[in-house]
Image (cartoon, grey):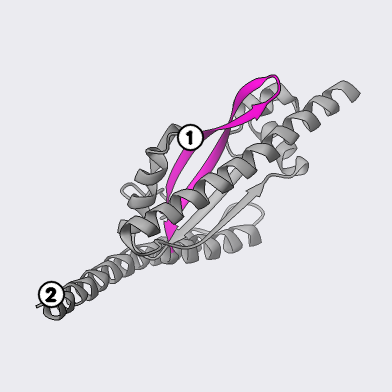
Amino acid sequence: MKKNEQEINALLMKYRFAMQMIETEITILIQEFQEIHGYNPVEHKKIRIKSKESIREKIKRKGYSYKASNILKYLDDIIGVRIVCSFLTDVYDIVSMISESSNLIVKEKKDYITKPKDTGYSSYHLIVLVPIYLQSGVEYLSCEIQIRTIAMDFWASINHKISYKFKEMIPDEVKKEMYEYSVIIKMLDQKMLKLNDTVNKYKSENKKEISM
């Protein structure tokens, strides 16, 4: 048991290294994007590492014993990054930006915006492999990145709080209402994107007039 705990502690230390790496990489990518395009597409971002308790609960839910080898093999979200953008186009710009990074390897993509979950949940998920540089060599650890709009993040936050209140099954009436609100959220994102396009159109026209 003591050896198992030591192995888990050593693995979590590596995940902390990887968390520092992914935070630095994303910060650099966003700053580079801002320099090239003249604006920052990110409203805010958050990064976290799962606690031992959360890891233990999740690995057991998956049907595996609480061991370092199983954590490494079966859990992709020990490190979690959430990037919240203003507009839908920003989400896909961020996806492209991360996908093209020479320092990260994209392991998996899940587009829950084009194909939302049955609950109505919308977001874009990436599983990326993050390099950490140790004396023994380079190792890669998984990280889950969730990219969504402000509106999607609002819905997801409310949905999480409501789900937490029901320890067992969520009533069908509540599920139905939350799904209906997710549709409204999607419509709002489309309207905000259209508004942004209109604003950009006027900005472009004003620049032309000034330069003439």
Residue 98 image point, x, y percent: 42, 43
Q: Is residue 1 visible?
A: no
Q: Is residue 72 visible?
A: yes
The reply to whether discs 2 and 1 touch (Cβ–Cβ < 8 Å) is: no
| Circle 2 residues within 10 Å: few <14, some 14–19, many ≥20 | few
The residue under label 1 is which amino acid type? Asn
Q: Secondary structure at mark 2?
A: helix
Q: Is residue 24 left or right of residue 38?
A: right
Q: Which residue bears the numbered disc 2?
A: 208
Q: Is residue 101 above or below residue 162?
A: above
The residue under label 2 is which amino acid type? Lys
Residue 178 image point, x, y percent: 45, 63
Quarter that holds the C terminus: bottom left
Using the image as rendered, state which of residue 90 and residue 153 is in the foreground: 90
Residue span colored magenta: 122-149
Report which quarter residue 163 is drawn in. bottom right
Q: Is residue 131 above or below residue 196?
A: above
